[in-house]
Image: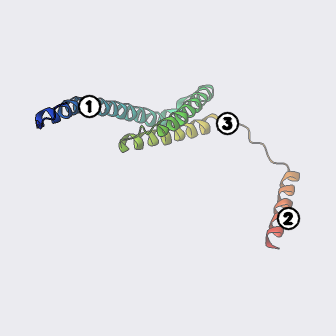
Amino acid sequence: MLLTLDINQMAEPVVEKTMRTSFLLRFFSFLEKRLIKDVSNVLDSAILKVEGSFSHIEELSNNETLILLSDTKKIISRFESLNESLLKHNYFSDNSVKEKFLYLNQVLYKFESLLHVASYKDAEVLKTPDEIKQGLAKLSRKNLTRLTT
């Protein structure tokens, strides 16, 4: 083996590999930015749609609100599992996307609560029997005296 002191021969493989890697990194960075922008736009649209439907809940019939409430609970459970998966894979590299996703989650919970109120506003309220009230009061007094002694 012959030792040569040619800097071009020694450094050229590094330059070639770096150029290819640099191109790939720029390409993946472009794709990531585009994906984040698309996800951000979809989140914005979903937030606006759900918030815009708040005022229309009262126009629905009781049966429609019950069906919509059931569907909303399913969507919320899917969002919870999606959130866990995204956090596990550290998908939220962009804070704005993370904040929008969490805000959409809050909006969905508010939508569910409004649907729940609208669904059960005409439901019969049952009066708690006096025996149960007295039993709860007695248990509370026992626990309170046990804690203070």
Q: Is residue 149 left or right of residue 92?
A: right
Instruction: Find residue 76 and report its horizontal and vertical position in percent.
Output: 55, 34
| Residue displayed at 45% across by 42% down | 103
Q: Nearer the viewer, residue 75 or 28?
A: 28
Q: Which residue is mark 2?
A: 142
For marks 1 and 3, give the one nearer the viewer. 1
- Marks 1 and 3, the one that precedes in the sequence: 1
Q: Horizontally, is 68 left or right of 123 in the view?
A: left
**Nearer the N terminus, badge 3 or badge 2?**
3
What's the residue at 49%, 39% (across, down)? 88
- Earlier-in-chain disc, 1 versus 2: 1
Q: CA distance from mark 1 to mark 2?
A: 66 Å
Where residue 38 appears, as percent x and y from the top left, is 33, 30
Label 3: element kind: loop
The answer to which quarter of the image holds residue 16 is: top left
Q: Residue furthest right?
A: 131
Circle count: 3
* In contact (CB < 8 Å): disc 1 and disc 3: no
Residue under circle 3?
A: 122
- In the picture of the structure, the residue carrying the numbered disc 1 is 30
The amino acid on which the numbered mark 3 sits, given as a three-letter code, is Asp
Q: Residues within 10 Å of mark 2 (few under 14, many from 20)?
A: few
Label 1 sits on what residue type? Phe
